[in-house]
């Protein structure tokens, strides 16, 4: 199959994908779940989730009501119950005699390693909980976390959860400005950071961004706790900045976890929406833990005694929350945590890690798989990957070609692939094959999980028949659903619940095939997906126009072979812009976006144009710009106020 599959008309090509891969008899026989699970959940959805909640978690106080949906869309799950996330992830395993089981095999980018057992991780979290409390962090307070992929990130998150503080993890790839706006929105009292990390063998810093973020007065931060990681010199604000190691050493290793209300806020995680302002997605405790733990066990067929699980996501994203920090530990699994990039110090680093720790479950993103495809199969072929038995994919649609390569080259032609669809807002996996049950199809997430009511509907909210496309919705509340947007319940209602009456609107296009399986077709709004990271066109446009040279800007996500989409910006400069050349302006503006939002948001291309295509009512026609950015003829431009604009842009680009 050619690259046309990815770039061309995905709708049509996907329809012709007919390969299917049923589980082997051996896999099915040993699988955690059998096909009856769907009927069981369908018979009584709430009873199903109540049973999962009670069997997967240890409650300090049992709940009285499974779901309170009396004020939709504000859900309350497991009403009256009390549960402590850290106790469930840690103490209870130690109490059950599993203290010596490895919780985390940490692999630093420079090659340093650390093996942390459940007993050791529990002690660290207890010390951190005591240390945070000693700094005045109390239940309900917010803690901003700006850390690399090191065990301290997980320790910090669980210590917050333990004392009922609400963590807000900010991905290390975000800038000082982005960090500050998130600190302000959540009114964080404490920031936990590190001097920095390593990137491709070189130190890369974090603490200076925290210092810059807190430079302007008017913030709520009282202390900054700093983990020593790369040993680089960092500026120090006496009285505000504290050393992680000193605090933890001084703290008591004893700490009793108390249950928190099932609806107590667990964390806020900011994600891009269709407007310039990121949304603080709020997740709470009982429902989130239930669905993350259930899906982790069901979708990956987890056997905690024998599996070695590795999710490559950073804790700065929701995947790193649900499937690194919470579910694997709640389920008592052994996991690998890797700090660095896949090509440091060589392009076989991941496969070396799989071989070394005998990883049996790998969960990663299509963009990574496509990168490995580009590097060539000789690289993974040089390692023993025979331990792998389940392969997961997340973050964007996986093209059938990448799916087949993943299965054949990484999975030895046998390991089932689970393509998992979900979002920051859904908290946990919603659509995925179950590896011992589903005959998988390359490129499709296929089936809503047991207990999840996903549908594809038309413009009017009517369910589409099999073989048709439309909008992806969720028809019934689910345990790990977002509860609101932090500080903005109206935006929560508007964004997700106003498009279709009584349904959650995900923002994705989807199609049901002739078997009723679901195929995801990408976003239908102004949200881009670059390497599985969500970026808002509007947010990048407002960063661009905040530069004094820029008069107007339009941003589109253009199809990209490796990253899924790439950010392409069309910019009109002011007549008094000081740029010497188009190249100079483009470089300056890319860096400006990096500073405003973060390196991940830097446009791949900045095209300086004399005009932007607009409708007669003044709306920018992004569709036409997307055509140009993807090298297509923009076609019908007759609805434009000035139909000549597109020819001019296209001519300029050919220069
Ligand atoms: C958006 C959510 C879920 C964790 C990572 C991203 C896209 C996610 C898939 C998939 C097709 C997918 C959707 C969704 N997406 N997984 N398996 N197939 N598309 O979380 O940053 O909240 O982004 O990612 O467009 O809406 P996120």
Image (cartoon, rainbow, N blue to C red):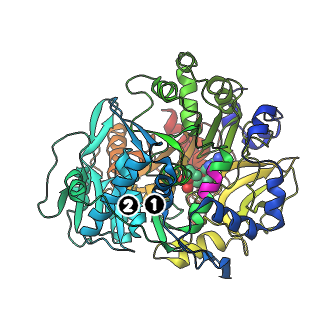
Q: State the mark number for residue 159.
A: 2
Q: Does the residue labelled 1 lie within 8 Å of ligand 1?
A: no
Question: What separation in Å lies between label 1 and label 2 (alpha carbons)?
Answer: 7 Å
Relative to 97, 400 lies left or right = right
Q: Position of residue 499 (x, y in %)?
A: 68, 71
Q: Give the range drawn in magenta.
A: 292-296
**Along the line of sight, which residue is nearer the eye, 30 or 525?**
30
Look at mark 1 in the image and give the residue it sits on. 86
Q: Position of residue 102 (x, y in %)?
A: 46, 41
Q: In which quarter of the image is residue 402?
A: top right
Residue 295 colored in magenta in the image: yes
**Along the line of sight, which residue is nearer the eye, 22 or 358?**
358
At x 76%, y 47%, the residue is 446
Most frequent secondary structure within the magenta stretch: helix
Q: Position of residue 97 (x, y in %)?
A: 50, 49
Neighbour tally class for label 1: few under 14, some 14-19, many 20 plus, Cα within 10 Å: many
Is residue 643 visible from the viewing direction of this image?
no
**Along the line of sight, which residue is nearer the eye, 34 or 447?**
34
Report the number of numbered marks.
Answer: 2
Quarter containing the N terminus: top right
**Along the line of sight, which residue is nearer the eye, 350 or 40?**
40
First along the sequence among labels 1 and 2: 1
Residue 263 colored in magenta in the image: no
Element at badge 2?
helix
Relative to 646, 210 lies left or right = left
Element at badge 1?
helix
Is residue 386 visible from the viewing direction of this image?
yes
Relative to 529, 206 lies left or right = left
Q: Do the residues labelled 1 and 2 touch (CB within 8 Å)?
A: yes
Neighbour tally class for label 2: few under 14, some 14-19, many 20 plus, Cα within 10 Å: many
């Amino acid at each position: 199959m050619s690259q046309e599959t990815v770039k061309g008309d995905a709708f049509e090509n996907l329809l012709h994908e007919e390969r299917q891969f049923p589980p082997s008899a051996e896999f099915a026989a040993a699988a955690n779940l059998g096909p009856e699970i769907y009927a069981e959940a369908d018979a009584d959805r709430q009873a199903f989730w109540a049973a999962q909640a009670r069997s997967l978690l240890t409650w300090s106080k049992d709940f009285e009501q499974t779901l309170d949906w009396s004020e939709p869309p504000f859900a309350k799950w497991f009403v009256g119950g009390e549960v402590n996330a850290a106790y469930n992830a840690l103490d209870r395993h130690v109490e059950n005699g599993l203290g010596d089981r490895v919780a985390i095999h940490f692999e630093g980018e420079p090659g340093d390693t650390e093996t942390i057992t459940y007993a050791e991780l529990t002690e660290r979290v207890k010390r951190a909980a005591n240390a945070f409390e000693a700094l005045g962090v109390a239940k309900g307070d917010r803690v901003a976390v700006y850390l690399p992929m090191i065990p301290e990130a997980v320790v910090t998150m669980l210590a917050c959860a333990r004392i009922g503080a609400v963590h807000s993890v900010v991905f290390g790839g975000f800038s000082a400005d982005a960090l500050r706006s998130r600190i302000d929105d959540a009114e964080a009292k404490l920031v936990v950071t590190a001097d920095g990390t390593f990137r491709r063998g070189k130190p890369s810093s974090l603490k200076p961004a925290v210092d810059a973020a807190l430079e302007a007065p008017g913030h709520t931060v009282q202390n900054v706790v700093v983990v020593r990681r790369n040993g680089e010199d960092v500026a120090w604000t006496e009285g505000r900045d504290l050393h992680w190691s000193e605090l933890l050493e001084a703290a008591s290793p004893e700490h009793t976890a108390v249950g928190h209300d099932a609806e107590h806020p667990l964390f806020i995680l900011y994600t891009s929406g269709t407007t310039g302002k990121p949304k603080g997605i709020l997740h709470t405790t009982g429902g989130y833990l239930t669905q993350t733990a259930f899906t982790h066990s069901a979708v990956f067929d987890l056997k905690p005694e024998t599996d070695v699980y590795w999710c490559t996501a950073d804790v700065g994203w929701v995947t790193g929350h649900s499937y690194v920090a919470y579910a694997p530990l709640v389920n008592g699994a052994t996991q690998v945590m890797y700090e660095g990039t896949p090509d440091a110090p060589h392009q076989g680093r991941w496969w070396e890690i799989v071989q070394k720790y005998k990883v049996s479950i790998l969960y990663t993103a299509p963009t990574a798989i496509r990168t490995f495809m580009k590097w060539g199969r000789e690289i993974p072929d040089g390692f023993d990957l025979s331990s792998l038995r389940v392969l997961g994919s997340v973050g964007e649609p996986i093209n059938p070609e990448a799916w087949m390569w993943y299965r054949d080259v990484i999975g030895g032609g046998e390991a089932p692939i689970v393509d998992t669809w979900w979002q920051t807002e859904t908290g946990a996996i919603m659509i995925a094959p179950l590896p011992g049950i589903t005959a998988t199809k390359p490129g499709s997430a296929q089936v809503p999980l047991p207990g999840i009511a996903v549908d594809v509907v038309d413009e009017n909210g009517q369910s589409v028949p099999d073989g048709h496309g439309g909008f992806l919705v969720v028809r019934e509340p689910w345990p790990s659903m977002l509860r609101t947007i932090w500080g903005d319940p109206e935006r929560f209602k508007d964004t997700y619940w106003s498009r279709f009456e009584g349904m959650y609107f995900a923002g994705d296009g989807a199609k049901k095939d002739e078997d009723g399986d679901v195929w995801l077709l990408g976003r239908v709004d102004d949200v881009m997906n670059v390497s599985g990271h969500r970026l808002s066109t509007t947010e990048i446009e407002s960063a661009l126009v905040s530069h004094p040279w820029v008069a107007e800007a339009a941003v589109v996500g253009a199809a990209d072979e490796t990253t899924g989409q790439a950010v392409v910006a069309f910019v009109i400069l002011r007549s008094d812009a000081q740029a010497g050349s188009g190249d100079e302006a483009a470089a300056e503006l890319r860096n400006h976006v990096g500073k405003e939002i973060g390196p991940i948001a830097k446009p791949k291309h900045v095209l300086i144009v004399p005009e932007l295509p607009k409708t007669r009512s003044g709306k920018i026609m992004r569709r036409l710009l997307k055509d140009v950015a993807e090298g297509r003829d923009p076609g019908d431009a007759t609805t434009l106020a000035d139909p000549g604009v597109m020819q001019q842009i296209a001519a300029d680009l050919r220069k």
